[in-house]
């Protein structure tokens, strides 16, 4: 199976809330090809499972591979805020809003941390 097929099996498992299986398929997909969306899905699964350290590792990878994805950038900004790196988070949120001024979650978060 190729990376995309494994990714799709992972998404199917995720949708069925079969998290262990989803993780397995997504990690196999990453072995064949690294893609930010795969890392993002692993971030979401580990977050659901309450495994924050593992979740954050995958979020960082997703952001490094695609810092221009608004959803990933927003989640990464929230991570930075938790890590007391508010200025970095502000910069990222400003970049998100410069390319997508109507992305309300980013504008709300930026407003909240700027007060």
Image (cartoon, grey):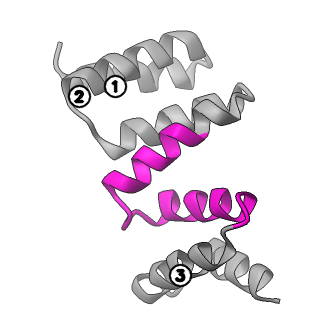
> How many numbered discs, if any?
3
Percent coordinates x, y for residue 26 in the rendering = 39, 23
Image: magenta residue range: 56-84
State the residue position of label 2: 4
Is 7 magenta? The answer is no
Q: Is residue 114 above or below residue 9?
A: below
Q: Tell whether label 2 touches label 1 (CB within 8 Å).
A: yes
Q: Tell whether label 3 touches label 2 (CB within 8 Å).
A: no
State the residue position of label 1: 8
- Residue at screen point 38% across, 15% down: 25
- Tell me if 9 is positioned left or right of 19 in this view: left
Q: Is residue 49 above or below residue 28?
A: below
- Tell me if 3 is positioned left or right of 110 in this view: left
Check disc 1: other Cα within 10 Å, few if <14, some if 14-19, many if 20+. some
State the residue position of label 3: 91
Determine which of the numbered discs, if any, sits on residue 26 in the image: none
Which part of the image, by quadrant, shows the C terminus?
A: bottom right
- Residue at screen point 32% across, 52% down: 65
Is 65 magenta? The answer is yes
User: Outermost residue toward the right?
Assistant: 115
Q: Nearer the viewer, mark 3 or mark 1?
A: 3
Q: CA distance from mark 3 to mark 1?
A: 33 Å
- Tell me if 41 is positioned left or right of 28 in this view: right
Q: Earlier in the sequence, mark 2 or mark 3?
A: 2
Q: Is residue 108 visible?
A: yes
Q: Which secondary structure, mark 1?
A: helix
């Amino acid at each position: 199976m190729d990376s995309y097929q494994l990714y799709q099996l992972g998404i199917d498992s995720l949708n069925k809330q079969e998290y262990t299986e989803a993780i397995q398929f997504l990690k196999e997909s990453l072995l064949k090809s690294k893609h930010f969306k795969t890392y993002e899905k692993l971030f979401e699964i580990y977050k659901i499972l309450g495994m924050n350290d593992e979740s954050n590792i995958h979020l960082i990878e997703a952001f490094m591979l695609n810092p221009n994805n608004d959803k990933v950038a927003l989640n990464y900004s929230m991570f930075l805020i938790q890590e007391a790196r508010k200025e970095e988070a502000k910069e990222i949120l400003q970049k998100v809003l410069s390319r997508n001024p109507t992305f309300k979650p980013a504008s709300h978060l930026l407003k909240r941390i700027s007060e």
